[in-house]
Amino acid sequence: MSNREKHDRMANAIRALSMDAVEAAKSGHPGMPMGMADVATVLFGKVLKFDPTDPHWPDRDRFILSAGHGSMLLYSVLHLVGYEGVSMDDIRHFRQLGSKTPGHPEFGHTVGVETTTGPLGQGIATAVGFALAERMAAAQFGPDLVDHHTYVIAGDGCLMEGLSEEAIEIAGHQKLGKLIVLWDDNHITIDGPTSLSVSTDQLARFEASGWDATRIDGHDPDAIFAAIEHAKTTDKPSLIACRTTIGFGAPNKGGTNGVHGAPLGAAEIAATRAALGWEAEPFTVPTDALDAWRLAGLRSRQAHKSWLQRFKDADMDRRCEFDRRQRGDLPSKFAETIAGVIAKARADGGAVATRKSSEIVLEALTAALPEMVGGSADLTHSNNTKTKATAKDVLPPAYDGRYVNWGIREHGMAAAMNGLALHGGFIPYGGTFLVFSDYCRPSIRLAALMGTRVVYVFTHDSIGVGEDGPTHQPVEQIAALRAIPNLLVFRPCDTVETAEAWKLALEHKSGPSVLALTRQNLPLLRTESTERCLTARGAYELIPASDEAQVSLFASGSEVSLAASARELLEAEGIPTRVVSVPCFELFLNQPEETRRQVVGKAPVKVAIEAAIRQGWDAVVGSDAAFVGMTGFGASGPAPQVFAHFGITAEAVATTAKSRLKSAK
């Protein structure tokens, strides 16, 4: 059998499994796997460094299927090369509930899947983070331990999404030469030919952002291999435009949008089998093709063994630190560092904005945790995200800094942070204004879905922004973030709560966290010394009532001090009032029911206070509680005047409580 015949048999195995699985599921996308089978065969068969027996080998090449709808391409290859976690039975149960082969690739669900993809553009943007992490890890641990590439298969939709522009600009600026994107240039989208909606010269576009770009025949294995080998020699990220036929091999539907997102049908599958010379029954791979694939799965075994020897030969300190960071464990001095920050805050006792509180905490944490990588979407001095330990910027050719200047690219930043976290060895945090979390939201949602440890520092968290006005004053964003499952949203009231929030965010290995922080100064409220992390409860009594409580005031962030002032007014009138700080809804709602009942208390009047919309508060205090906050957008003016304008004052809270108390009697 010639090399070309062997290649065709291997590629046709992908095509057959893909069309059979989609047909069995009665849904899916057979066109892309069939069109990119030749590219995948060259990539996994001759280029990619991986070992199916150790899917988490730290120095493996990373493969990201940005065009996640074509998931059967990846599942087919993972099965063919010998990943034990993807059996033929899993292929048969494509898109079925509980199977290891869901509609789109899901990180943590299927072995060999590096990141969750499906929302177009996310894969290529996350890959930027993977590639940047590789360069930074190599700078910190040496090229003998870290030296691998990041490969991406992307589709037309990935390149049309605006996120891709942010991603390719970051990659080009950082000269990520080990990032190689293989574009499925098939000229087809769901609606029809790409000429209906786009006329961009993609090669010129990528070249303008500092990429190396070339076009090849995506069905010519020699051209594919040569293009990849060339890409590995340049210090620029590479785009390889692979001109393909979607649904390659299907005699009637190939090359049309009819094969993009629907089963081929029995008749077309039979015709395709005949056209490809594939006589095997559905879900059967002939011995010659399977043997060739299994040999491909063994190809990197020697490279893996050599790496293990280099790792064994490395000095103990470097080896232990590398291992710790790959496991995601925090250093032993972490708890001591947090305790020191809290003790100093109590000793200082001054009023500071919680964005400044965060900076104080970060100064200590980044010095103790070399895996922390900071950044901001061009708001460094507003987000207070740069510290002495992260003062050096991440830039080529050294990549030995710890701070990434993402530019005004919130979405690209958030997606790349996912890649930094997924690569292993880093804990990324990045900042912007809370109102611009909307630009990050798709990537935040994926971080929550994947369970990645990413920390978002969102400052300017309310109408307290003041003069910048309603365009910059978040009112619905905090509720929108709280609506995302598996996302911890912290809105701390002072430096102590901010330190505790950072502690909990870094200890939370199975999901991302948000710190919503103020622009305006806030007094230190947690003055009593305690070793307990009260923020871990999500909500707790901060100030008790002088007697049996008649009023309970619940608040987060800047409104906790406002609640404390309202309490003084009510207590002065003989109304026993308690204050409950609610820094994290998610942690509170995860407490046992009895604990939550005790925190809410039995006071006849409950008032929740937050300079944002009410949504979400009913789960904490009940729908019968009063609410002092926002019902619409903000206004431009000095912050104190804006708060007064919207009735978010201690006096307004006291008046609301007294009115409710009068009605209750």
Image (cartoon, rainbow, N blue to C red):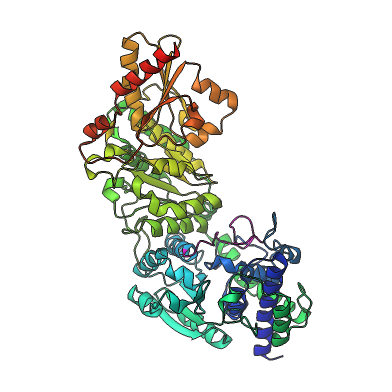
- Residue 4 visible from this viewpoint: yes
Percent coordinates x, y for residue 337 in the rendering: 42, 37
Total number of numbered labels?
Answer: 0
Q: Give the range drawn in magenta.
A: 101-121
User: Which quadrant, please, contains the N terminus?
Assistant: bottom right
Side of 552 relative to 593 (left or right): left
User: Please, what is the dominant secondary structure of the magenta stretch?
Assistant: loop
In the rendered view, would you say 631 is above or below 264?
Answer: above
Between residues 252 and 212, which one lies in front from this camera angle?
Answer: 252
In the rendered view, would you say 144 is above or below 491?
Answer: below
Residue drawn 69% across and 55% down?
97
- Residue 334 visible from this viewpoint: no
Between residues 304 and 101, which one lies in front from this camera angle?
Answer: 101
Percent coordinates x, y for residue 183 in the rendering: 49, 76
Percent coordinates x, y for residue 220 in the rendering: 56, 87
Residue drawn 43% across and 34% down?
500
Percent coordinates x, y for residue 269 in the rendering: 71, 78
Farthest residue to the bottom: give it: 2
Between residues 283 and 360, which one lies in front from this camera angle?
Answer: 283
Q: Does the magenta stretch include residue 106?
A: yes
In the rendered view, would you say 205 is above or below 165?
Answer: below
Corner quadrant of residue 171: bottom left
User: Which quadrant, please, contains the C terminus?
Assistant: top left
In the rendered view, would you say 131 is above or below 345?
Answer: below
Q: Is residue 475 magenta?
A: no
